[in-house]
């Protein structure tokens, strides 16, 4: 990804292409928006074709619309999102972790530290109105010597404005107090660790709205599958 007046991605084409997809106030299509951005970033579909997916008769964009169109207003649950992306039969390897029982928080941070794209589904802690998808593209945090402690997940959020001179437009940040906070004992075990875990709450922040406390419902890593 390349930052500038708008966020672009360098594909096989000579010129970087704009790929951000923004949802409207009326739809519940955050899931299909981030799926489209992922395909554009990984050069599996042209952004211009994805913008016109509902009118396409063939190709990857048409397959995306056929798979996701029933979710456009209703939204999509994590397990179904994974099934729909997998049904496209693209060279993508998906690894999904669900909620606190799978340590979705710890896996998300570990994958992002490795440079992977991670689709995140999250919900409000205080009410049922917010259930949302965003694309995690990086982390921020503290580094002391060789020890890195991420405390913020950087997001490309289809419900926020298109980023300018940045590669993210929203974030999930560990609060200073409360479950999973930066001042509390560490509660983000490594993916290889077992044991009972407590829920982790994040502050969901963007320029367009007040911070909201959320919890992760799912983290899905997406990688290009190597072909022989």
Image: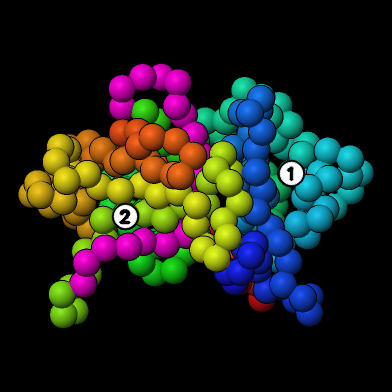
Q: Secondary structure at mark 2?
A: strand
Instruction: State the residue position of label 1.
Output: 64
The type of colouring in the image is: rainbow
What's drawn in magenta, residue-wise? Answer: 125-143
Residue 139: name its quadrant: bottom left
Mark sitting on residue 152: 2
Is residue 25 among the parts visible in the rendering?
A: yes
The crowding category of the residue bearing disc 1, from other C-alpha atoms within 10 Å (few below 14, some 14 to 19, many at least 20), is many
Is residue 214 among the parts visible in the rendering?
A: no
Sequence-wise, which precedes: disc 1 or disc 2? 1
Q: Residue at x 91, y 44 (%)?
A: 57
How far across and how far down the image is residue 48, in percent?
Answer: 81, 55
Q: Nearer the viewer, residue 29 or 118?
A: 29
How far across and how far down the image is residue 120, in percent?
Answer: 45, 45
Position of 108 relative to 114 (above/below): above
Position of 29 relative to 126 (above/below): below
Q: Nearer the viewer, residue 195 or 75?
A: 75
Q: Tell me the mark number nearer the camera, choosing from 1 and 2.
A: 2
How far across and how far down the image is residue 13, in percent?
Answer: 79, 75
């Amino acid at each position: 990804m390349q930052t500038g007046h708008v966020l672009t991605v360098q594909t096989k084409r000579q010129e970087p292409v704009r790929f951000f997809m923004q949802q409207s106030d009326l739809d519940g299509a955050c899931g299909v928006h981030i799926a489209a951005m992922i395909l554009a970033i990984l050069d599996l579909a042209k952004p211009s074709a994805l913008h016109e997916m509902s009118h396409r008769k063939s190709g990857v964009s048409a397959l995306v619309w056929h798979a996701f169109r029933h979710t456009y207003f209703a939204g999509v649950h994590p397990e179904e999102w994974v099934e729909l992306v997998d049904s496209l039969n693209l060279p993508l390897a998906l690894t999904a972790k669900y909620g606190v029982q799978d340590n979705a928080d710890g896996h998300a941070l570990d994958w992002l530290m490795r440079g992977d794209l991670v689709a995140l589904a999250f919900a409000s802690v205080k009410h049922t109105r917010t259930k949302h998808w965003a694309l995690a593209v990086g982390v921020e945090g503290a580094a002391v010597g060789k020890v890195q402690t991420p405390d913020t997940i950087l997001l490309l959020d289809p419900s926020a404005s298109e980023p300018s001179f940045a590669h993210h437009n929203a974030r999930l940040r560990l609060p200073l107090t409360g479950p999973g906070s930066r001042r509390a004992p560490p509660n983000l075990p490594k993916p290889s660790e077992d044991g009972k875990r407590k829920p982790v709450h994040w502050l969901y922040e963007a320029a367009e709205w007040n911070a909201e406390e959320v919890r992760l419902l799912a983290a899905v890593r997406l990688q290009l599958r190597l072909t022989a």
